[in-house]
């Protein structure tokens, strides 16, 4: 079984400030971890993913995340927020091929960016 | 762009009527998924398919059925729609090779309102 907890359903930052969106997971097997972004009235777009290898992964739009097995975390960061980053962000976990790739999502975090 | 389309994009229906949503993909992906998105719940898996005529239940499958008679189409049916099935429905495919491996790509979604 697997689960995802996103800490904070709403996060508000000023433009230019650090963005930190928190994600903790549980998984009985080595996890594959994903961050998706959803802009209003659109589908989900992949930001970045961790499957194997380097634990610090870089994604699109200047975002990155670090897989920390000991903390069961996969927090998303961006050094400097831009107005265009305002969206809803979802963390997700899968057990890869052993589970037919089924994803379990967190409840989402809405990011607001103030001028 | 993973070549995923969903139809219809919007639908209003009445309680007790049957509804079928269609997901169409153009890239011969083996794995396809149906999720529903509700505020505070993120996305939850309804059903998934791992090949033609091969389907299985997800986390929230009650009241839904699926069919996959050819690779490119995955149909989701609400046999008798209820107000609790008002939601946004997303179809996804899973990449299986190269940089797309283990990654799910999502369609644009279908907004369903059951009155």
Image (spheres, coloured by chain):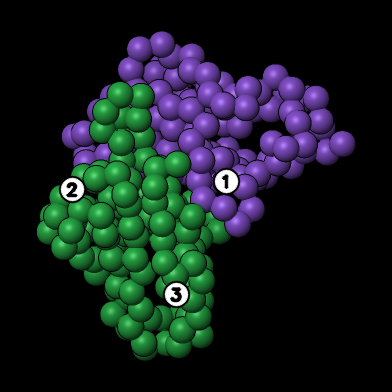
Chain colours: A purple, B green
* Frontmost residue, B15 versus B20: B20
Identify the residue position indicated by label 3 in the image.
B84
Tag 1 secondary structure:
strand
Q: Residue placed at 49% from the left, 67% from the top? A: B9
Relative to A24, residue A51 above or below: above
Identify the residue position indicated by label 1 in the image.
A38
Categorize mark 1 by other alpha carbons within 10 Å: few (<14), some (14-19), many (20+): some
Label 2 marks a residue whose chain is B
Q: Is residue A5 visible?
A: no
Label 3 marks a residue whose chain is B
Q: Position of residue B61 (x, y in %)?
A: 28, 64
Tag 3 secondary structure:
helix
Figure quadrant of the N terminus of chain B = top left
Relative to A69, residue B37 above or below: below
- Given this view, does label 2 or label 3 mark the residue nearer the observer? 2
Relative to B79, residue A68 above or below: above
Q: Position of residue B73 (x, y in %)?
A: 26, 59
Q: Is residue A27 left or right of residue A45?
A: left
**Dots 2, 3 in contact, CB < 8 A:** no
Relative to A67, residue B114 above or below: below
Q: Residue placed at 60% from the left, 57% from the top? A: A41
Q: Position of residue B82 (x, y in %)?
A: 41, 81
Separation (CA) of disc 1 from disc 2? 26 Å
Separation (CA) of disc 3 from disc 1? 23 Å
Label 1 marks a residue whose chain is A
Q: Quadrant of residue B59?
A: bottom left
Q: Residue placed at 34% from the left, 60% from the top? A: B23
Separation (CA) of disc 2 from disc 3? 27 Å
* Frontmost residue, B58 versus A7: B58
Tag 2 secondary structure:
strand
Identify the residue position indicated by label 2 in the image.
B50
């Amino acid at each position: 079984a697997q689960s995802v907890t996103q800490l904070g359903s709403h996060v508000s930052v000023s433009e230019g400030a650090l963005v930190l969106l928190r994600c903790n997971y549980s998984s009985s097997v080595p996890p594959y971890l994903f961050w998706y972004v959803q802009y209003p009235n659109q589908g989900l777009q992949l930001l970045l993913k961790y499957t194997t290898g380097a634990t610090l992964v870089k994604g699109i739009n200047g975002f990155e995340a670090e897989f920390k097995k000991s903390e069961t975390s996969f927090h998303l960061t961006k050094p400097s927020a831009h107005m265009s980053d305002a969206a809803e962000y979802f963390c997700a976990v899968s057990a890869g091929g052993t589970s037919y790739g089924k994803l379990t999502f967190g409840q989402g975090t809405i990011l607001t960016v103030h001028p | 762009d993973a070549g995923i389309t969903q139809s219809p994009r919007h639908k209003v229906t009445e309680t007790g009527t049957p509804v079928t949503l269609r997901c169409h993909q153009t890239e011969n992906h083996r794995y396809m998924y149906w999720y529903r998105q509700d505020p505070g719940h993120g996305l939850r898996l309804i059903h998934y398919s791992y090949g033609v005529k091969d389907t299985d239940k997800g986390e929230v499958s009650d009241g839904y059925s699926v069919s996959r008679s050819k690779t490119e189409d995955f149909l989701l049916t609400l046999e008798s729609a209820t107000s609790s099935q008002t939601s946004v429905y997303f179809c996804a495919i899973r990449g299986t090779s190269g940089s797309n491996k283990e990654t799910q790509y999502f369609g644009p979604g279908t907004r369903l309102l059951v009155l």
